[in-house]
Image: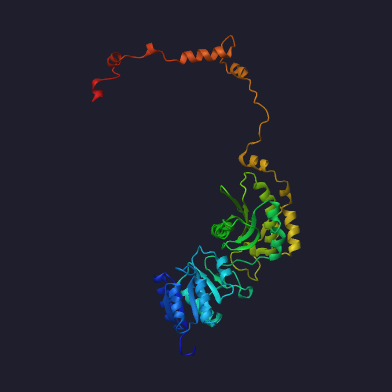
Amino acid sequence: MSDSQPMRVLIVNSRRKTSRSWTASLKECEYHYDVVLVASGEEAMLEFSGMPYDLIVANYRLPGMSGVDVVGMAQKRMPDVRALLTAEEDTNLDRVRRESVDLPVDAILTMPFEAEDVVRTVNHILFGPTASEDISADVIEGGEEDNGGPLVLHEHFGYIPPVNEAILAETLGSLAQELAAQAVMLVSRAGEIVYSAGRTDSGLDIEQIALYLGRGFNRLSKLAPMLGHRSTTSMSHTKGSDYDLYTLSVGLHYFILLVFNDVTQRRLGNVLRLARPASNAIILTMGDAAFLLDEPTDEPAETVFAIGGENVEVGEPMSVEEALAVAQEVTGDEADFDEEAFVDALFGQSFATTTGPIDLDLDGLDAELGGLDETGDLDSFWEDAASEAEIKANDALSFEEAMQMGIYSDDDEE
């Protein structure tokens, strides 16, 4: 397209009001894009038969075909076309990125966002980073282009540091087998599954579950810095009729998700004993970044973070070997975790099962309270007490006697 002609943008979105706002902003920006708006993939197909477009802005959820399908069809007609996908907040980004990895999708913009964010992202795709300097580092999260996937842009998650893949294989690879779990995963607070071992049933939508859990964990990450400089640990247990889910935090950005398909009550001890060292090792390979909600700078951290009862400082990222050794040492005491003792300490009493009958000296107790008569016969004592409490018929008042005593009057009948 010549320099004198504005670049053409096709917006495919069923939300007319929202799309009109994007359209107006793109037309009025410095590049004055030529924008066409359609509401479905079928309408977009008709547009592909005319003049080519430079960029497709398609919502992932559309009536009929998905936004990914639209981009795929556009690529067949227009090999040089670029694409931006938009997605609702509860969209499974992991799935979107897998579906679009072989397509010309440069970015995924997740809600909530403003029309100005659409303009900046479109400028970034078509004219490069210099055209969108307002896109700050805390807006960009997730995949890099050289990793084979599009950038994921979402303001509400901000900076999420990368994880050392080698430590995940070392720590989580055997955890599912050791805990007899159906699956074990590392999930980011954006709800993306970063690592997975084991296998879940086809009927269990684990990607959607990870997404919902990630949203909740993202909110907790904002609370953690208020609680102190040590490693803040959060653990949850969700019990269902068919599945049990456990989560254990890994710093502020990730959590371990364990899936069990056999429901049992006594699993807390093993989860803590085996998953905690894995969590600490992953944290140590991330360093301070595990606890920073903003991207680390060259300046030394003002707060010294620590893990474990020994207060091991978390500073520069450790190697996998060093992290494994330190994490095992820090959490070594948890190898002797006694779940019954933990419950006893938690509730302040013992829940141990009694092995024999309870032997109470009732006669001695009553005698001590002075309740028995001179004979000391317990049966006689209770028989006498019952007879004294019995209400006899001749103790009852007649209606006439109640009237004479003023307990009941004729006025009460009205």
Residue 251 appearing in the image: no
Residue 329, quarter of picture: bottom right
In the foreground, 232 or 75: 75
Residue 34, horizontal then vertical, whole percent = 43, 83
**Relative to 138, is 49 on the left or the right?**
left
Residue 308, above or below 404: below
Residue drawn at the location 47% of the way across and 80% of the way down: 48
Residue 267, horizontal then vertical, whole percent = 65, 47
Residue 342, quarter of picture: top right
Residue drawn at the location 54% of the way across and 64% of the way down: 92
Number of dots carrying numbers? 0
Q: Residue furthest top?
A: 375
Residue 285, quarter of picture: bottom right
Residue 151, above or below 350: below
**Relative to 333, is 87 on the left or the right?**
left
In the foreground, 191 or 414: 191
Residue 146, horizontal then vertical, whole percent = 63, 75
Residue drawn at the location 66% of the way across and 34% of the way down: 353
**Relative to 146, is 18 on the left or the right?**
left
Residue 283, horizontal then vertical, whole percent = 67, 60
Residue 105 appearing in the image: yes
